[in-house]
Image (spheres, rainbow, N blue to C red):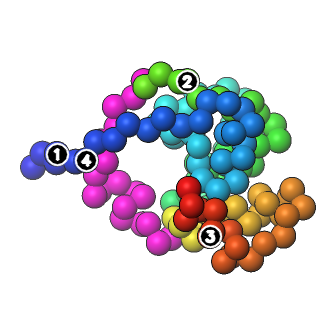
Amino acid sequence: MIYHGRRSVAKPATERLQILAELLFQPPLLHPSVMLRREVFVRHGGYDEAASHAEDYALWVRLMPHARFGNCPRVLMDYTLSPAQVSRRHNVQQLATARRLRIAALGRLGIACTPEQVRIPCRLA
């Protein structure tokens, strides 16, 4: 069976500070398009298996103080959304993990917040 899924064009932030700010509330990097040096990946622990279904987001948050993030302003990837992808099949667990990561990232910046407070900007985004 061929799935003719919904298509969409994502245009993530390209400015460094905007990417860092957005990282506190959602992943501003399109995981399949990310390029990074293997040594940086290994040095900072790679993917965290405890971050169920949000391992990439956990890595980006952990790399915040150590890496320069950027996004190309041109559309370079064709990505089809499918009901079989992880973010659809494990959405509840992925959202819970992401919420925990956001609270920890904000805490490292000295911003204490409750789970309900961290949901507000996510809903706005």
- Distance between the alpha carbons at the discs numbered 4 and 2: 23 Å
Question: Which residue in the protein does label 2 denote?
Answer: 72
Q: Pointer 1: what residue?
A: 4
x and y, in percent, of residue 20 in the image:
72, 42
Residue type of the residue flagged with mark 3: Arg
Where residue 81 appears, as percent x and y from the top left, is 31, 48
Q: Quadrant of residue 83?
A: bottom left
3D distance between C-alphas at marks 2 and 3: 28 Å
Reading the image, the residue beneath label 4 is 6
Residue 48 percent across, percent down from the top left? 65, 55
Q: In the figure, residue 50 lies in which quadrant?
A: bottom right
Q: Give the Cα separation between the discs numbered 3 and 4.
A: 26 Å
On screen, 97 above or below 60?
below
In front: mark 1 or mark 2? 2
Earlier in the chain: of badge 1 and badge 2, it is: 1
Question: Does dot 3 land on a helix, a strand or a loop?
Answer: helix
Q: Amino acid at mark 1?
A: His
Looking at the image, tell me whether mark 1 or mark 3 is earlier in sequence order: 1
- Residue at 38% across, 37% down: 9
Which range is magenta? 76-93
**Which label was assigned to residue 119?**
3
Q: Is residue 92 magenta?
A: yes
Helix, strand or loop for disc 1? loop
What percent of the width, then of the height, locates residue 86? Answer: 40, 57
Q: Residue furthest right?
A: 110
